[in-house]
Image (tube, rainbow, N blue to C red):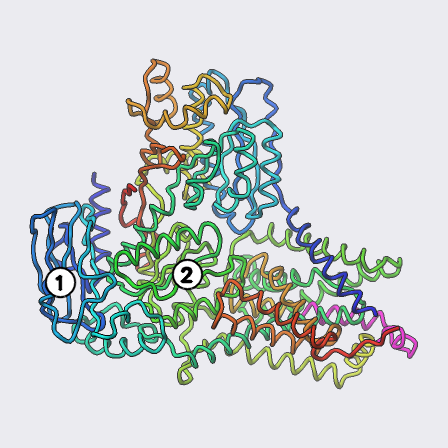
Amino acid sequence: MRRRLVTVLLAVITAILVIPAGAVADDQGGETLNGQIRKPETVEGIDITVYQGSEEIGTATTGPDGEWEVEVPGPGAYRVVLDQESVPDEYVVSERPGPEHDEVQVREGQQRTVIFNLARPGEEEGGSSASPSEPAQEAAEEEPAQGEGTPEGVTTAPGVSSATPFGTKVVQLTVAGISFGLVIAISAIGLSLIFGTTRMINFAHGDMVTFGAMMALLFSTGATFNDVPLVVAALIAVVLGALLGIGLERFLWRPLRRRNVALIQMFIVSIGVALILRHLLLVGFGGNRERYDEYQLQEMIRLGPVGVTPRELTIICLSVLVLVAVAAMLQFTRIGKAMRAVADNRDLAESSGIDVDRVTLYVWGLGGGLSALGGVFYGLSQSVYWQMGFHLLLLMFAAVILGGLGTAYGAMVGGLVIGLVAQLSTLWFPSELMNAWALAIMIVVLLVRPQGILGRRERVG
Amino acid sequence: MPSKKALGLTAAVAALALGLSACGGGGESGGGEGGEADALRFGYIFPETGDLSHLGPPQISAAKYALHEINEAGGVLGQEVPEILTGDEANDAAQANDAADRLLGQDVDAVLGAAASGMTMAVIDRITGAEVVQCSGSNTSPDLSTYEDGGYYFRTAPSDLLQGPILGQKVVDDGHQSVAVVYRADDYGQGLAEATATALEENGAEVVLNEGYDPNSTNFTSVVQQVAGSGADAAVLVSFEEGVQIITGLIEEGFSPEQMYSADGLNNEGLGELVNADDPGAIAGFQGTAPGVDNEQFTTALTEFDSELEVFQYAPQVYDCAIVIALAAEAAESTDPTVFVEQMTAVTQGDTQCSGFAECRDLLAEGQSIDYQGASGPLDFDENGDVTVASFMIYGFDEEGTHQALEYVESKP
């Protein structure tokens, strides 16, 4: 009994905390029907009558802030009617939900809210319209009235009470798409270069992304390592990712190649590696989605209509820097040139004196490190969990193929396109189809340009 | 043309990879070679791995606890119930099917689970088709009510058709009039989102956004921005754990947790820490509904049984599943599922109220007709195998981010 009392009390306290607009303090415990007429704006002096069966229970008139309340004798079913006579001439009662609520069930102790909406004549169907401009207008008019009447009104959160115009949405989603695309690009470079140098599709690449994210999680939040700052943990993760890549190449792929194992077998082996890695991570870290403990819940930086968190902005800037650095390395350094040469034509590179095995080892190291970095960025922007890389893998493949197999620059461009298409598609299509559109655009591009955006046409024969 | 060939191979291998990954994990089947041919044999299909693995431990413990109680009281029809056979649904239809086949191959009489509505959809034909009783403690999809199951499928969790109105009403009672609903696009999310949206509209609130997202998605930026851009003054998130990403995104977009609501999927004691490890109070004011009962006694008893258990969601429901099955077998005086299935409804609707296996069995032995009062509520199965009276709790988080049950509400259709 005491427990129930406490529960009810807690409920009432929360109700008061949470519903400053609805609850009135002197009615604690009693059942009421209440509401606030605030669409399209708060209206005073509207009569609302509550019936039980045919018996009239009570009448209330809306106050200056559009609120009304009727005490009812106890739980049960009531009929709530808005008196159309009392509605000022400039409004009509909106068809949905109409002037009358039948069969309103009130629970014990419940202060139930009943909604009535008004509309201006001629804008009758405004209530159900989802067109972006109209609600924005309504909300703009509504806000000042709210501000006076209810100091802690429920619709006062900034940027929330009005629908965002289409243009702003486009810019917002473009920013999101760039950030997503850059993460895909960083992660996919290794995939593309590894394919270029060894002709092997590395199915474990997605799980190398997860590996990086999880290592950063281990070092930044794990009790064992005394909370290394995330920046340091990310660097450790990149190094470990590179070591993982190098280790796989040195102790698995190179021996397999030496024994002349065919490509198809190597594919299957890479799937095996992917499964082992993924499930080891699952066993080690569990199946929950986790987040880094730093840089969370940040205040948005508002650049005009567009808001972006410092975290997202940093990820974008760092990603661009890393991509530029990688591009410079590929373009100007000896090892970078060698990588591109091997990716172009392994045999020719070998016969011209390049140590192909060493270059391949570096490519794996570079790919592993970059995918780990991509994982950290992705985990920071979204969340870390054991299948994150696996679910990203398909998009990485799409990016690599779209951009042109085997070229690092192709992976960058492809990643950006995939990220942008995925995010921008949600402007018109359901979000659950986000990835489908990214893959569809890949198919369309391949139909027009079979070698990919930056790929070179293969010689036939 | 190496790269063309590689493309073809990639496609082939991708298909293979998907298939192979479905074979990963998998629970080990327990012993259970009891010997007595007539013992009532239970099996379960619960998420031991996969996205919903957090739902697994309370359900598994509850099932084991129920069997422990039954055996303490002397077993079913005087026979000790052998140890429960395990199966992992892994949030993967292929693995769930595999688990179901293995359980059926070991001649189980009753299967507890699956936990997720979608996984039940995957295995229900196999299990009920083999004339084995299936009872889930956490399936809430409305589609399962009228599903052709030959009368072999039961559930002790209420359909979303009962939960949706309570959630919708709660949102409206808090003074919100335009609401955005986002849901994971699976059997669970769609069913509950639809029921909630309907309830909101019946209450006169405007549903300005009703949008599903891919539950496997890793990127929720667009969902967050759709909610933020919809002009809603409240958001309902029908999500599992991925909802944490949406919550943090919305907070950063300027939404207050007081404007966010969810259902059983986010009824998680540790939600505050998941959103912000440094300051769990960041979600103060966040509320939601979940099937739940005010049953401290059961929670304490289950904690004594399994001291490591921290989350109790759906544990009473699963416990009730096992007890009702055992009582039905007692009432039918048979452990043959085709016989005792007839008694499943009867033992929840009889004349004499009772609770606990021992008490109810003794009443049955005296020849009385019993009305089992479960740990999760009065039960009372209807002809679809659904409960007709369900208890829900409204949960919320306080300034410290501590999870609280604010109110318990009974719902009748």
Horizontal side, residue A220 vs residue A404: left or right: left
Q: What's under tag 2, amino acid-wise?
A: Val
Q: Where residue A49 sits: x, y (%)?
A: 10, 57
Q: In the displayed orientation, state which residue is furthest to the front.
A: A122
Q: Secondary structure at mark 1?
A: strand
Q: CA distance from mark 2 to mark 1?
A: 31 Å
- Which residue is found at the position 24% from the left and 61% from the top? A97
The residue that label 1 is drawn on is A68
Left-right relation of A385 to A57:
right
Label 1 sits on what residue type? Trp
**Image quarter of residue B385:** top left
In magenta segment, residue A346: yes
Residue A243 in which image quadrant: bottom right
Q: Which residues are magenta?
A: A345-370
Q: Give the prevailing secondary structure in the magenta stretch.
A: helix
The answer to whether tags 2 and 1 share a subunit is no
Q: Give the structural element (helix, strand or loop) at label 2.
A: strand
Nearer the observer, A257 or B192 = B192
Q: Mark number for residue B182?
A: 2
* Viewer-proximal residue among B296 and B134: B134
